[in-house]
Image (cartoon, helix red, strand yellow):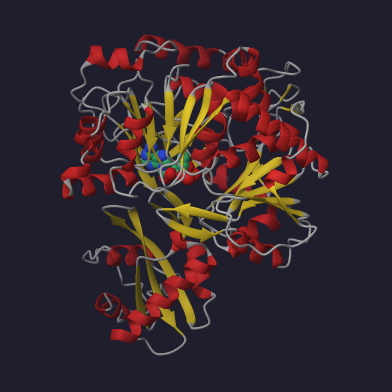
Amino acid sequence: MSQTPPIDRSEAARRSQTPYITSMAAYNAMCDEAARDYECFWARHARRLLHWHRPFTKVLDETRAPFYTWFEDGQLNASYNCLDRHMESGNGDKAAIIFEADDGAVTRITYGQLFLRVCRFANGLKALGLGKGDRVVIYMPMSIEAVVAMQACARIGATHSVVFAGFSAKSLHERLADVGAVALITADEQVRGGKVLPLKSIADEALAMDGCEAVKYSIVYRRTGGQVKWAEGRDRWMDDVAAGQPDACEAEPVGAEHPLFVLYTSGSTGKPKGVQHSTGGYLLWALMTMRWTFTARSDDTFWCTADIGWVTGHTYIAYGPLAAGVTQVMFEGVPTFPNAGRFWEMIQRHKVSIFYTAPTAIRSLIKAADADEEIHPKRYDLSSLRILGTVGEPISPDVWMWYFKNIGNGHCPIVDTFWQTETGGHVIAPMPGATPSVPGSCTLPLPGIMAAIVDETGNDVPNGHGGLLVIKRPWPSMIRTVWGDPERFAKSYFPEELGGRLYLAGDGAIRDKDTGHFTITGRIDDVLNVSGHRMGTMEIESALGSHPLVAEAAVVGRPDDTTGEAICAFVVLKRPRPIGDEAARLAGELRAWVGREIGPIAKPKEIRFADNLPKTRSGKIMRRLLRSMSKGEEIAQDISTLENPSIIEQLREST
Ligand code: WTA
C-alpha cells in the first residue's frame, strides 16, 4: 500500500509546478498552523481568496453544534467571484468553457461572453419574479446553458437544486416537491452516445404529479429543436427569458450561510436527502482545492468528466474552475462514443493539462484499449497532461498504475481525491509537490481537515487497524443541514454513539502503519456505489416493493470488475417462485420497473427469486448472508439463528 510509484521526480515537479505548496515541510507547517489557531487559518484563506461585499468579523460559530456556521456576518456572491472578478482583472477574452457536443461540434465561450449570458438570463429570471431565497430545480443535459442556469441562480440569490438528467419523472417529482421549487429549468431533449432522449416530456410528467403546484415556470433550453408539448403560461424558452434583457445584472450580495444549493443524495435509510450547502464556506473550498489538489494555474486547461447532476459537477465544473479562472472542457456525451478513444482524443484535441475522472471510466477504457489497439491511449498525443485525478470510489493499485503509465506517461502525479456530496470538495487527497501520490491511497487529509479513524464508540484506532472514518472539527464547506429535516442531519452525521461531535462519513478506512496514509475501504452502511453513483439499498428495495407482483425484496451490492459494485436483488413474489423463462421475463420486467421508478442507473444487474428471504427469528433480513451469496461465497456466517434455513439452497439455486 505504501509502495512508491516510479515517478520521475524532476519531471513530476515540473508538471505539478506548485506555486501553492512545495514540500512536505510546507504541508506540515500548514497543518500545524491550522491546529494552533483553527479560526485564523481559515479566516486568512477566506479573506485572501474570495471577494466579500461585506467582510466577515466572525469565523466559526459552534454554539449551535452540530449546526455550525462559517463567516456568518460576511456577505458575498458566488457568481461575482466566478465571473465579475475576471472581467475586472482583464480576462474577459479568455476561454471559460470549451464545450464538446456528443457529435464532436465544439463551442467556445469566453469569460466575457459567459458573464453576459449569465447576466441576461439572471435578469430574465428576475423579470419572472424570481429572486433571493427561491428554489429553482435544474434538470438539464451537460451544456453551457446548464452552467448559465446555475450561475444565474447564484447571481440573484436563488438556491438551485440540480437533478441528474438520468433520473425518472418520479425521482424528479420527489425532489421538486421536497425542495419547494418555484421554477424548473430543463431542455427539450438530451443527446448522449448518438441517442436522443426526451427530457421535457419527463419533466412534464413530473410536474403533473401532486405536490408540484408551486412550480410556476418551466424554462426550456432548446437543445435539439425536437417536438415538445407546451403549457401556455407555464412554459418558456430559455432564449426568450433572456431576450431583450439588459447586459448588466448586479450580483445580489448574500450572507455567507445563504444556501447556494441543495443537492439530493442517497443515505442508508429513507428517501434521498437534500444536502444543503452554504455560499461562503463552499466557494472557498471549491477555489482552494482547485489550487491545493489540482495546483490549477491560469494557463491550465482543466477537464472534469463528471455530470453537473452530481456534486463533482458542481464543485469542479460549475464553481471551482470558474472561480479559479481556468479554461475548462465540458463534454456532453459518453466516453465510449463514437469509440472508447473519445477521452484520449479530446485530451489531445483540447490540450487538456488537468484531467479528472472516475475509476469506473478508467476500468472500462482499460478493457476497451486491451480489446482494440486502434483506440489505445498510446495512439494519442497526451503530452499536454500534467495532473491526473480520480474520484467517486476506490481505485485499485493496478488501475492506478495503468492510469499513471498509459495516460500520465509515468510522470503525472495522480490525485486520488476522497470526498462526498456532504463535504463540498476534496477532504483527503494528495497535494502534488508536497504529499506523494500512492497507488490505492488518497494519502493525507488536506491541511485543516481533522480526519481520523475511530472505533464504534468514537475512540481513535491505531494505524494499521480499520475503523470508521470521521472528521473531528467542522470545516468551511461541510453540509449545513438536510433540507427540511435538521433532525435527520444531526442523527445521520453526528451520531450520539460517537459522542455527537464527530462528523461520520459513512465510509470505512485504514491508515498505513508506517506512513499514516489513508485508504478508503468502502461504505459501512447500506449505501451502494455503482459506477461511482451513490444509491441507497432501501430506495431500490422500495421501488421493487411497489411493483404489484412483489411481496418483499432485499438489495445488496456485490463487487464488479467494471462498475465497482453491482446491484443484486433478492425478490419474493406474491405468487409461486418463477423458474426458467418465466423468471427471466419477470426479472426483465422488474428491472424496467426500477428504471422507471428511479432511473436506469438503479436497475439491478441481477435478480434472484425465492419463496422467502433469510431472516433471523426476530424477523430481520440477514443481509450479510445475502451479500456472501451474491458473491457466490461459501456461507461462513452462523446460520443457527436463521428462521428458515431451507431458503439458502433455493437462493443459491436461483443463480
Ligand atoms: C466514495 C462523490 C474511495 C465514498 C464525490 C464516499 C471514494 C462516496 C472516493 C461519496 C475515493 C468518493 N476513494 N471512495 N477517492 N471518493 N468515494 O456523495 O464511499 O457521490 O462516501 O460524492 O463515494 O459519494 P458522493
Kindly identify the residue that appears in the image at 20 percent across and 30 percent down: 405
- Above or below: residue 45 compared with residue 184: above
- Give x and y (percent) for residue 234: 77, 57
Q: Splitting the image into four quadrants, where does ligand 1 fall?
A: top left
Number of dots carrying numbers: 0
- Above or below: residue 23 compared with residue 156: above
Q: Quadrant of the N terminus?
A: top left
- Give x and y (percent) for residue 631: 26, 62
**Which residue lies most toward the bottom here?**
576
To which quarter of the image does residue 473 belong? top right
To which quarter of the image does residue 79 belong? top right
Observer-nearest residue: 345 or 412?
A: 345
- Give x and y (percent) for residue 503: 53, 37
Residue 99 visible in the picture: yes
Q: Quadrant of the C terminus?
A: bottom left
To which quarter of the image does residue 435 belong? top left
Kindly identify the residue that appears in the image at 60 percent across and 56 percent down: 188
Observer-nearest residue: 575 or 325?
A: 325
Residue 424 visible in the picture: no
- Give x and y (percent) for residue 269: 54, 58
- Above or below: residue 556 compared with residue 143: below
Kindly identify the residue that appears in the image at 60 percent across and 19 percent down: 92
Observer-nearest residue: 380 or 103?
A: 103
Side of 229 relative to 123 (left or right):
left
